[in-house]
Image (cartoon, grey):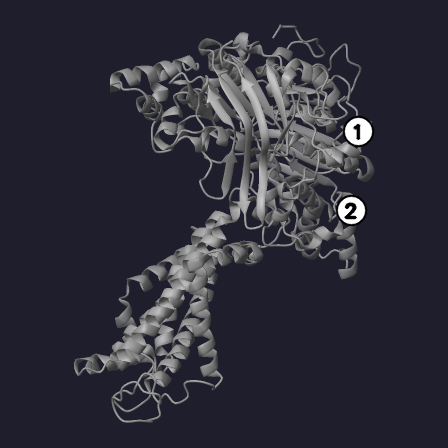
Amino acid sequence: MNTPSQIAGTPLLEIRQLSLSFHPQKQLAIDRVSLKITAGSTLGLVGASGAGKSSIARAIMRLIKPDSGEILFKGKNIERMNAEELKSTRQHIQLVFQEPSASLSPRRTVEQTLLEPLQHFAIGDASYRQEKIREILHTVGLDRGALQRYPHQFSSGQQQRIAIARALVTNPDLLIADEAVSALDVSIQAQILQLIQMLQKDFGIAFLFVSHDLAVIRQIADDVAVMYRGQLLEQSTADQFFTEPAHPYSRTLLSFAQGKNPLNQLDDSWHLQRSHSSDGNTPACVFSAFCPDKKPVCERLEPPMHDIQFKNQHALGPHCVKCHLYDEVKTNVYRETKL
Amino acid sequence: MTRDTWQRLKSDRYGMSGFIVVTIFAIVALCVWAGLLGQGWSEVSGNRFESASARHWFGTNLLGQDILQRTLFGTATAFEVGLMVTVCSTLLGTILGGLAGWYSHGWLDEIILWLKGVLDSIPFYLFAAAVAFALQGSPWAMHLAMIITFWTTTARIIRGEVMRIKQREFIDAARAIGLPGILIVFRHVIPNTFHILLVQSTIVFVAAINTEVILSFLGLGIKNGVSWGLMLAESSQEVLAGHFGNFVAASTSLFLLLMGFNLLADALQDALETRGELN
Amino acid sequence: MSAPALRVNDLSVWFETGTGRVPVVDHISFNINAGDATGLVGESGCGKTMTAMAILGLLPATGVGVSCTGIEINGKDIHTLDGSRRRAVLGRDIAMIFQQPATALDPVFKIGQQISAVYRRHTNVNRQHARQAMLDALQSVGFKQAEDIAAAYPHQLSGGMRQLAMIAMATVCKPAVIIADEPTTALDSSTRELILHQLNRLQTLHQTAILFISHDLAVVRKSCRNVMVMYCGRLLEKTDCQSLFAHARHPYSAGLLSCIPQISDKRPAPISSIPGQIPAATDLPTGCHFAPRCNRVEDQCRTSIPQLDHENGGGAACFRPL
């Protein structure tokens, strides 16, 4: 399936310079992140745990309030919406969580859980709602016998299907999946990914897919955005990312994921010191402490986000990277440093 | 879910015996309310201090009233006090504790906690006496005094549970579609505390009956009717004169019912808690 | 030929419920030689962790039944050992590394204290010696500042560091066998690499036998020589890693391998999956447990149970292997 990842016109969801910190004076959980998701496309948001990916998902759903920045849905700023517009927006963005057993209310039947969004948003009448939930159950591959049962009576794969069904009843334009398959066994993960692929193809739903697993992202994403310590380091099409990622951190991630072990290049301390948050003198580039291609300027100056285009790649789509290595030449070829 | 719990309860011998005892007493109470038993509790049907006989199974008391009748009526009183206090204080405690937990560290929480603190620090029996006085000896004074003070324990427990549960993801899911807080608390959070509430209710029931016994001793107990507490109060004099009828009947009934409840409460706690185990 | 470091013979575990026995581990047998790592892979509920707990004797006394013809470490049977003798073996001859280092370490004790405690439990040395052994263990897992780590509490360390501390705790007495239960599942990719690297190093250094339990085939491939595939309490395939990944013989193993998403240059084809669900332990099919989901099923699969070929190292428990 080849959804064009740039469609002229307003993106479905746009985040501009979003910032959020959980503790003042400490590291920002989200640090001036800007993202765009076009209708019908899937953006994979990757990075190690703690990078801020889940925080972005929660900020979009207004489960946490950002300190600054804008979130625009279909061009309108969420902060400036009135109650009705906000309600309508909530209808069109839904969230699927990582732990299926934790995200379903244990004392409510599947029917009650599926009806709740329809009732809350006052969608349709009683008969429409009944039909809708049966239709959605069928879409996710469950039979209507499931309606009267409780979440704990299902396997985790089925529970995740129920969670996805709940997200689908309101006909959303965008589904945010926050590590939605990470807790599942491999064969069940495959089934859920198949379901997601079907939703992408047949229903044209856009996805913001948060995951630390690059292989899963490769399966379903059109575009990839890489986060590290709250900052966005690179955003490009998936094809570009998996062929030749630009940022050194992206390259490291991809190496690890492909099973190549660059440990002989990186010090053991790479892993151990990573957890020591440096609230002393913060280096200018957030990754500079561990970057194999570090230059002196990286510790002095924060790199701006550049738009780049590889010479040997035909324009596959917008590609931006936050790295000093791309300062000098506008369209350049990455200077090969063996990892 | 409840079927599972029931299965586990059934296999617990002590718990089941507790359950049976409580059920028997409950049936007696129902029969009294229905007018089938214990109706002759105030009737002077014999001589004073008759010993146990065919006509008076437990003998008679100081006034010649049949002790058995009074014991049966006392069962109804115990259940009436127990149920009323339990239902009302649990309801009050759940609502206030739920709100306090959901809006924890906010102004509502502060007020409720303050209220709880004040009520917890008042010596209970003085408070009961004060309420009885204020209500001019109304028969409901005792119930009211208990309800007003017992809700705090339930509230504290529920508040803690709500604070725990609201961290879970299905609450985020509800918030994510924009459901208002109060709705989430009472639709999604509180139902997940039922297992705790059930156990807590049995404990409150026991406490209510116990308290009534002591209040009756102090003369602050029930007004129309008889309770085991009242019988025990009466018996304090009688025992010195060698008449044990009242004492034995009342204290045995009390012991059996409270023991039954305790066993039931423990077994319920076990049966409800093994839900998340090796399965 | 000396005895294998770990030998498990015909181990079964079941739950005793009101309605009868629910099998969780069904007559499994395997050997691991000193210096070898064998992976035990399978999906949730297949019985992998129960196997580990049964070997260590950590299953609850009531409600669970265990039977086997022998569990031997270096030829000595440990299954028939009782109470205190069994406890003496734990930590000294066989140790376990758990999945969640956050909850497997006691939050109120410092790391150093916990590791020393294990060492002193099994040896009769004074504090000085124990402390030294503890620092050595921490250094051997890669901590450059062992003293600092020893003085820290678990919550002060990151997930990866806690896991390394756990490995130090497990290896301080230099046991012959280590059971690692999903040691890297809760960690992200870079930390995972480090943990596997250290585990591998220690294994070579002390010639420890490792039973590596995981649902992640890629991790097992990297760190184990042999692999066993478990499904619904039974071992379906037993072979060396290279063979499994080159050509899995059991349809379930093959299906599992094809489910794993891959990273590739081109957008990959839509992912395939194994149809159906894993059956509940209370509702297992007769014959081969995988029969209802297998695309190579034939009649005898539903009536008789295919066995592993123990003479020739295992192979696939299948009537129609690939």
- Based on the displayed image, in which of its 4 quarters is residue A124 positioned? bottom right
Label 1 secondary element: loop
- Structural crowding at the residue carrying mark 2, measured as other residues with C-alpha within 10 Å and reported as few (<14), some (14–19) or many (≥20): few
Chain of the residue on which disc 1 is drawn: C
Q: Which residue is mark 1?
A: C296
- Structural crowding at the residue carrying mark 1, measured as other residues with C-alpha within 10 Å and reported as few (<14), some (14–19) or many (≥20): some
| Alpha carbon distance from label 2 to label 1 | 28 Å
- Residue name at image x 44 percent, y 55 percent: B269
- Based on the displayed image, in which of its 4 quarters is residue C161 positioned? top left
Q: Residue B144, relative to residue A293: is it above or below?
A: below
- Residue name at image x 56 percent, y 54 percent: B4
On the same chain, marks 2 and 1? The answer is no
Taking depth in this image into account, of C147 and A119 the one nearest to the observer is: C147
On the image, the x and y values in percent for residue B131 come to 32, 76
- Residue name at image x 70 percent, y 12 percent: A330
Residue C39 shows up from this direction: yes
- Based on the displayed image, in which of its 4 quarters is residue C264 positioned? top right
Q: Please give the count of numbered marks on the rendered protein.
A: 2
Taking depth in this image into account, of B120 and C278 the one nearest to the observer is: C278
The quadrant of the picture occupied by the C terminus of chain C is top right
Amino acid found under the numbered disc labelled 2: His
Q: Which residue is mark 2?
A: A138
Q: Which mark is residue C137?
A: none
On the image, the x and y values in percent for residue A339 come to 60, 8
